[in-house]
């Protein structure tokens, strides 16, 4: 079953349309893609349970199953920028762990280019909220580190690291250690490190949540620029509605207890050409629509296992 996709009627006037042409491999309503290839990512009836201890039933607690993600079905096209928004605890990070191969679904399937994801791989780069940089290595050395593991020769490593640090706007800061960089700069290094592998897919788990508002907005624009330049498929987790609307071509809305896909919203905003797109009526309408859906979902009766 494919989640319903809704496009808000675009209000008259200023904003042009971002990417009216479907990206290569865009998913058609029947689940096929425009060029006949499988979607870059295909999640089919993904279900993830954890075993937890119920402390209300004795000191040691009886073991019971907890459903974190339930019946999640969604295709992500090659080159698409998908944002996933939902309240705290709705299973967003669990979903990203599953996509990253850091966890396996209890049932259901997750495929990348038609192949089942069975573990972590260099075809997926992951960027977390915490930068996870090695503190004793410089920015360049942090980027090179992963390339060494991939078997890239030393001379080539240095050139690739320079190229990606340049792409994220850190030329001149290559030899700084993490403690000599701002939070935004550290996150840029983390993004450069993930991109340096040249992964098919960039998986981002609230990467800008720890940053101040201004740095966050700057990095959002940087990320969009990098996405356009590289054509990567991006899955970006956030609990910020504005961030989800600003970045995503589509926004997947999740509901909690258990984490389910509520719906998917198409975003037709021209972030590039509008002066301050966040203050436009179209942006406000999209934000309100997502807010309404999240609140409607939250009022549903809690689901008990
Ligand atoms: N390893 C685990 N064992 C047991 N329960 C877990 C485990 N990992 C996550 N959970 C539970 O699964 C649910 C979803 O957690 P998850 O971290 O995916 O949510 P989230 O939407 O990313 O939350 P947040 O926005 O607060 O980061 C939560 O109720 C959490 O307690």
Image (cartoon, helix red, strand yellow):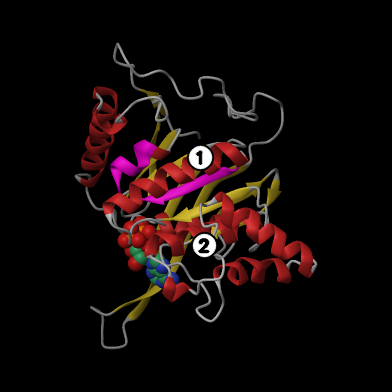
x%, y% of residue 240?
30, 47
Q: Name the residue that disc number 1 marks.
A: 225
**Picture residue at 43% right of the left edge, 73% below the top:** 180
Q: Position of 262 compared to 49: left or right?
A: left
x%, y% of residue 26?
59, 29
| Residue found farthest to the top | 12
Q: Are marks 2 and 1 in contact (CB under 8 Å)?
A: no
Q: Is residue 173 above or below residue 16?
A: below
Q: Secondary structure at mark 1?
A: helix
Is 263 contained in the magenta span? no
Q: Quadrant of residue 208?
A: bottom left
Q: Position of 232 compared to 37: left or right?
A: left
Res 239 seen here: no
**Picture residue at 51% right of the left edge, 24% below the top:** 19
What residue range appears in magenta?
232-246
x%, y% of residue 131?
46, 67
Q: Residues within 10 Å of mark 2 (few under 14, many from 20)?
A: many
Ligand 1 rendered quadrant: bottom left
Q: Nearer the viewer, residue 276 or 287?
A: 276
Q: Name the residue that disc number 2 marks.
A: 190
């Amino acid at each position: 079953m494919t989640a319903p996709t809704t496009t808000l009627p675009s209000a008259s006037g200023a904003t042009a349309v971002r990417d009216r042409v479907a990206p290569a491999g865009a998913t058609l309503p029947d689940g096929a893609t425009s060029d006949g290839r499988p979607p870059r990512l295909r999640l089919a009836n993904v279900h993830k349970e954890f075993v937890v201890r119920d402390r209300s039933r004795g000191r040691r607690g009886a073991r019971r199953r907890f459903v974190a993600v339930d019946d999640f079905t969604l295709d992500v096209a090659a080159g698409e920028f998908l944002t996933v928004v939902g309240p705290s605890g709705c299973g967003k990070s669990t979903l990203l762990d599953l996509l990253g191969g850091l966890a396996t679904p209890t049932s259901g399937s997750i495929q990348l280019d038609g192949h089942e994801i069975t573990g972590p791989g260099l075809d997926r780069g992951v960027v977390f909220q915490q930068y996870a940089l090695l503190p004793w290595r410089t920015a360049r050395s942090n980027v090179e580190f992963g390339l060494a593991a991939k078997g890239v020769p030393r001379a080539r490593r240095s050139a690739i690291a320079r190229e990606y640090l340049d792409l994220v706007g850190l030329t001149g800061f290559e030899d700084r250690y993490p403690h000599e960089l701002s939070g935004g700069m550290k996150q840029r290094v983390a993004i450069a490190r993930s991109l340096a592998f040249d992964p098919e897919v960039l998986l981002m788990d609230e990467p800008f949540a720890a940053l101040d508002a201004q740095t966050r907005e700057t990095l959002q624009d940087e990320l969009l620029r990098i996405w356009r330049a590289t054509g990567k498929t991006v899955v970006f987790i956030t609990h910020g509605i504005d961030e989800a609307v600003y970045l995503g071509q589509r926004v997947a809305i999740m509901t909690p207890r258990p984490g389910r896909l509520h719906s998917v919203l198409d975003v037709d905003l021209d972030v590039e050409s509008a002066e301050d797109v966040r203050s436009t009526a179209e942006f406000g309408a999209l934000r309100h629509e997502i807010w309404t859906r999240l609140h409607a979902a939250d009022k549903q009766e809690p689901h008990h296992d």
